[in-house]
Image (cartoon, helix red, strand yellow):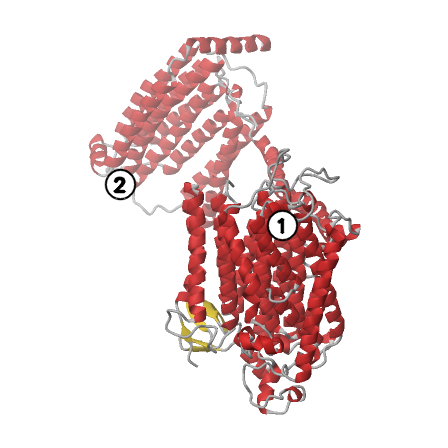
């Protein structure tokens, strides 16, 4: 199986771009969070592609770390969203504008 | 040249300092009057004893400082040595400073003892004595310093202590104002001294008074340099600004004016009477105000080569004397009379310096210290007995209640008026004679207008007798006026601010106050006998008692104030000196030119004249005031010729207005604060603008982050593309 | 040959799911789309001979994280995303930035194609085997692993702290205020 590095990197870039647009576009906090996960996964993909290309296990280790961090981030982030919801009864991030000016 | 060294000299200076420190630190905690008084007096007593020891040569290895040619030195520490400039913390007692130190410490000791009684009951007792000791320290530093710079340190120190002590009653508004006034006027004089020191250094390369060797380095004194290397300056007005010796002389005299209250810097002295009476006695009669005279006499070598400066000194001295005497005639506060009397007598001293009679000036300083301190302490005793009432219009017949004070003050009165045997006669008479005969003694030859100055001096002597008689009569004779109500009775002199009880009778002061008075009275009586001039001691009856050459004072001081002509008269035929060196043997103690028969006859005549005028003044005063003590004198005299008002209007008020309006409000508040506040406001307004970037919306933040990321990626891509080509 | 086809299949699937994720307003639909993305990525990992990572991806992401997300969506009873009322400019900005990113991706693609392959790819050498990863994890990369452990501990503590119960009275007041505002806005 030959690996086509360029293809994988292109796919990774596209997914990342979609995720980035989604972060700005979505008003739902959960939606925003999911787009961030998408971006992380895009990066994971490129890491694994490089690891396969160069035959180095480091890339996959890195992916492992990223996944752990993503898991931790999910836990904490969702906790924040819940706490936010308790105060505002809304997960609209536009309502989280107390720091305005 | 061999020097005499004696480390005890530093003890003279430091004993009062130690006393001050002890009083400040420990006395403040103990708040025990006996402790503070004893510590202070013992400190000064130590200085006094050692001073006499070193001066007269008891109990020390060498001969007394008053009798040897070279000064007794004590090099305590090297202060600074930069390039060619060298200033040491070095003390030196020669004949001049020896005399000064002796009478300063002795009179100071008596005043300290007096003050323990006078200040009894005051809450700041320890503070007072700490300041007094600090003052003694500064004054002794001034006198015993062996170079101009250290002397200036003492000069400033006494100015500071004067400020502290005049403003001692910090609650009294007038005391605070008087202290400030004294300090500021002193400061103006200090400028003069500093400029003079700079100029001296630039002209001569040294500021030391004595020739000495320190650490193997030879230091020349200013005066040997001046006499050997520089030439006398002409008596012209241009020489004042010439930057030479005359300029130095004038600048030094400006300093002396500030410190010794001559025209135009004299108005602080009467106001300084707001301080406690012992302070007035010590500082403003006996010691600090004589520092100016000391400075001038110490620098006599410079002055003898700067005749214009001497003329200026003489003129100002004489005019101050008569001016102050005229004001003293009309004052009602007993201390103010004495204050103006001090200014007047200081004028005499400067008159003497100006005509070249330096020995007479120092003699008058010493006798004046005795009788003026006596008069001030006596007035303090009177004030104490009168429960702090100082207005003479409310006194009268006090000789019945305060006999000791009365008796001692009589001696002071007679001394200052110039009655023979009493101290003031000899010194004042000497000054007047020398003024009259100034043409003979003046180093530059003819003294312009010395007869006029002599007339001024004579008139002042008469006025002195009149106002002193007036003071005595109003205080001690006549009917008791304790309860009179006066038109302008503010009562602000009365510390207790309550009227005297109906059956009030003054009482004599305690022994701790009267004993110093008695000692000073004795000194005022016999203190002048050390300086009997030849003309009088050669009188037949007198000669058998005191010996032919009884002018011991002059003999002691002669080498210090060696007149230029003397050195020439020893060897060559000097035009001025030769006609009077009738005495062929150059006996060093003989006053050159003073022993020719015409001179002696003239001196005797003048002496008799001054005695007669003094008696005349006393009689006039008695007649005028005995029956009518409250006789009113011309109002302008009472208002001090409105000098204070003139100064205020011309100088003080414009300066205050300038400071307040333009410098404070305009510059400080407006400009500097404006810059500082403006910087702050600028930052705040910029912040207000920048604040709007923070919208508070998370998505906007995300967008910005993404923009940043895009930029970074773009950068890498750009360079990557360049790599690839 | 087969791999290329499989690659394009899974790639297309991933992109489609990603677009669906961004498009849908209902958070639940977005969540399901995201799961789709994860699954396709797992298949891609398999294509890249990284079986361990693929399985872990499914387990952690699709199995744990997405479950958590759906759980929260259900708990909070989220409504559909309302149409954009404010910050309309962000939509345009977002799309613009996305386009820029895409262009940059294309450049990367081009650059990688252009770069001469200096390293010969050994198709038989697989480093994705569990054994290999395990070996590396516990020898060379021990420290990061341990740190990740601590990180997870912190996350647990943080999570617990964040969702502590508020004072009921306070919570009442806040909820009341918020309800008022929404009713007014409605």
Compared with residue B6, is residue B475 higher up or lower down, i.e. above or below? above
Q: Position of residue B196 (x, y in %)?
A: 61, 69
Foreground: B350 or B327? B327
Q: Quadrant of residue B5?
A: bottom left
Horizontal side, residue A66 vs residue B472: left or right: left
Q: Most extreme residue toward the front, as rendered?
A: B541
Task: Verify CB contact (< 8 Å) between mark 2 and mark 1.
Answer: no
Is residue B376 something that shows in the picture?
A: no
Seen in the image, is C122 located left or right of residue B121? left
Which mark, by number, is residue C122? 2
Numbered mark located on residue B273 in the image: 1
Q: Is residue B508 visible?
A: yes
What is the chain identity of the residue bearing mark 2? Answer: C
Residue B508 image point, x, y percent: 55, 45
Q: Which corner quadrant holds the N terminus of chain B?
A: bottom left
Q: Nearer the viewer, residue C5 or B485?
A: B485
Viewer-side residue, B238 vs B614: B614
């Amino acid at each position: 199986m030959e690996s086509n590095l360029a293809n994988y990197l292109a796919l990774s870039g596209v997914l990342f771009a979609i995720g980035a647009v989604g972060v700005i576009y979505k008003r739902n906090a959960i939606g925003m969070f999911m787009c961030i996960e998408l971006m992380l996964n895009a990066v994971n993909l490129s890491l694994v592609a490089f690891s396969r290309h160069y035959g180095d296990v480091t890339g996959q280790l890195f992916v492992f770390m990223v996944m752990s961090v993503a898991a931790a981030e999910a836990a904490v982030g969702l906790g924040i969203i819940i706490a936010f919801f308790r105060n505002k009864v809304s997960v609209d991030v536009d309502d989280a504008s107390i720091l305005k000016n | 040249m061999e020097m005499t060294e004696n480390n005890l000299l530093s003890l003279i200076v430091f004993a009062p300092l130690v006393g001050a420190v002890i009083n400040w630190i420990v006395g403040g905690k103990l708040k025990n009057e006996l402790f503070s008084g004893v510590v202070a007096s013992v400190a000064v007593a130590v200085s006094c004893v050692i001073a006499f020891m070193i001066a007269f040569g008891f109990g020390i290895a060498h001969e007394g400082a008053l009798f040897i040619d070279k000064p007794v030195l004590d090099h305590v520490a090297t202060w600074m040595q930069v390039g060619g400039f060298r200033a040491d913390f070095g003390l030196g007692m020669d004949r001049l400073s020896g005399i000064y130190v002796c009478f300063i410490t002795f009179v100071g000791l008596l005043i300290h003892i007096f003050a323990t009684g006078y200040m009894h009951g005051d809450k700041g007792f320890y503070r007072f004595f700490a300041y007094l000791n600090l003052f003694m320290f500064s004054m002794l530093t001034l006198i015993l310093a062996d170079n101009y710079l250290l002397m200036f340190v003492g000069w400033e120190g006494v100015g500071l202590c004067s400020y502290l002590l005049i403003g001692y009653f910090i609650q009294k508004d007038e005391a605070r104002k008087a202290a400030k006034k004294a300090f500021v006027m002193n400061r103006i004089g200090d400028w003069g001294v500093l400029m003079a020191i700079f100029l001296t250094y630039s002209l001569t390369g040294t500021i030391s008074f004595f020739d000495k060797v320190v650490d193997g380095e030879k230091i020349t004194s200013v005066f040997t340099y001046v006499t050997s290397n520089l030439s006398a300056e002409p008596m012209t007005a241009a020489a004042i600004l010439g930057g030479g010796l005359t300029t130095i002389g004038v600048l030094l005299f400006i300093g002396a004016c500030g410190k010794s209250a001559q025209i135009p810097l004299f108005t602080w002295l009467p106001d300084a009477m707001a301080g406690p009476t012992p302070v007035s006695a010590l500082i403003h009669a006996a010691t600090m105000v004589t520092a100016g005279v000391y400075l001038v006499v110490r620098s006599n070598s410079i002055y003898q080569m700067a005749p214009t400066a001497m003329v200026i000194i003489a003129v100002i001295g004489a005019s101050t004397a008569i001016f102050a005497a005229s004001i003293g005639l009309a004052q009602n506060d007993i201390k103010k009379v004495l204050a103006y009397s001090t200014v007047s007598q200081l004028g005499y001293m400067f008159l003497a310096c100006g005509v070249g009679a330096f020995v007479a000036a120092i003699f008058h300083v010493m006798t004046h210290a005795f009788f003026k301190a006596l008069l001030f302490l006596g007035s303090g005793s009177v004030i104490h007995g009168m429960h702090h009432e100082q207005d003479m219009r409310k006194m009268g017949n006090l000789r019945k209640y305060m006999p000791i004070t009365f008796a001692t003050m009589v001696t002071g009165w007679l001394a200052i008026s110039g009655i023979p045997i009493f101290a003031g006669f000899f010194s004042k008479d000497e000054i007047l004679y020398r003024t009259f005969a100034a043409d003979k003694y003046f180093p530059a030859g003819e003294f312009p207008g010395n007869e006029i100055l002599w007339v001024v001096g004579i008139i002042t002597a008469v006025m002195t007798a009149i106002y002193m008689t007036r003071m005595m009569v109003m205080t001690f004779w006549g009917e008791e006026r304790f309860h009179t109500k006066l038109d302008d009775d503010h009562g602000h002199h009365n510390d207790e601010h309550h009227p005297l009880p109906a059956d009030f009778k003054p009482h004599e002061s305690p022994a701790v106050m009267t004993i110093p008075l008695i000692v000073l009275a004795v000194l005022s009586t016999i203190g002048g006998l050390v300086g009997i001039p030849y003309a009088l001691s050669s009188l037949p009856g007198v000669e058998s008692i005191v010996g032919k050459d009884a002018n011991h004072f002059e003999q002691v001081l002669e080498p210090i104030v060696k007149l230029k002509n003397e050195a020439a008269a020893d060897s060559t035929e000097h035009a001025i000196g030769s006609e009077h060196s009738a005495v062929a043997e150059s006996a060093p103690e003989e006053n050159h030119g003073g022993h020719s028969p015409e001179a002696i006859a003239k001196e005797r005549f003048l002496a008799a004249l001054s005695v007669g005028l003094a008696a005349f003044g006393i009689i006039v005063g008695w007649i005028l005031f005995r029956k009518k003590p409250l006789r009113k004198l011309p109002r302008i005299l009472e208002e001090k010729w409105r000098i204070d008002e003139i100064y205020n209007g011309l100088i003080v008020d414009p300066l205050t207005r300038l400071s307040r309006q333009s410098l404070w409000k305009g510059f400080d508040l407006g400009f500097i604060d404006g810059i500082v506040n403006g910087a702050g406001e600028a930052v705040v307004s910029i912040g207000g603008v920048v604040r709007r970037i923070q919208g508070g919306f998370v998505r906007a933040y995300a967008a910005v982050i993404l923009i940043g990321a895009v930029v970074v990626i773009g950068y890498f891509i750009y360079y990557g593309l360049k790599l690839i080509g | 040959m087969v791999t290329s086809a499989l690659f394009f299949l899974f790639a297309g699937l991933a992109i489609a799911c990603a677009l669906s994720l961004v498009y849908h307003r209902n958070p639940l639909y977005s969540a399901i789309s995201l799961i789709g993305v994860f699954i396709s990525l797992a298949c891609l990992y398999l294509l890249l001979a990284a079986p361990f990572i693929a399985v872990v991806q499914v387990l952690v992401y699709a199995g744990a994280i997405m479950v958590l997300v759906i759980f929260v969506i259900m708990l909070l009873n989220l409504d559909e995303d309302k149409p954009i009322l404010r910050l309309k400019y962000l939509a345009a900005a977002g799309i613009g930035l996305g386009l820029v990113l895409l262009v940059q991706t294309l450049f990367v693609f081009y650059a990688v194609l252009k770069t001469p392959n200096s390293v010969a790819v050994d198709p038989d050498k697989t480093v994705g085997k569990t054994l290999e990863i395990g070996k590396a994890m516990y020898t060379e990369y021990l420290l990061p692993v341990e740190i990740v452990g601590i990180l997870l501990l912190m996350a647990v503590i943080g999570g617990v702290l964040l969702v502590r119960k508020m004072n009921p009275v306070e919570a009442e007041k806040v909820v009341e205020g918020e309800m008022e505002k929404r009713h007014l806005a409605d």
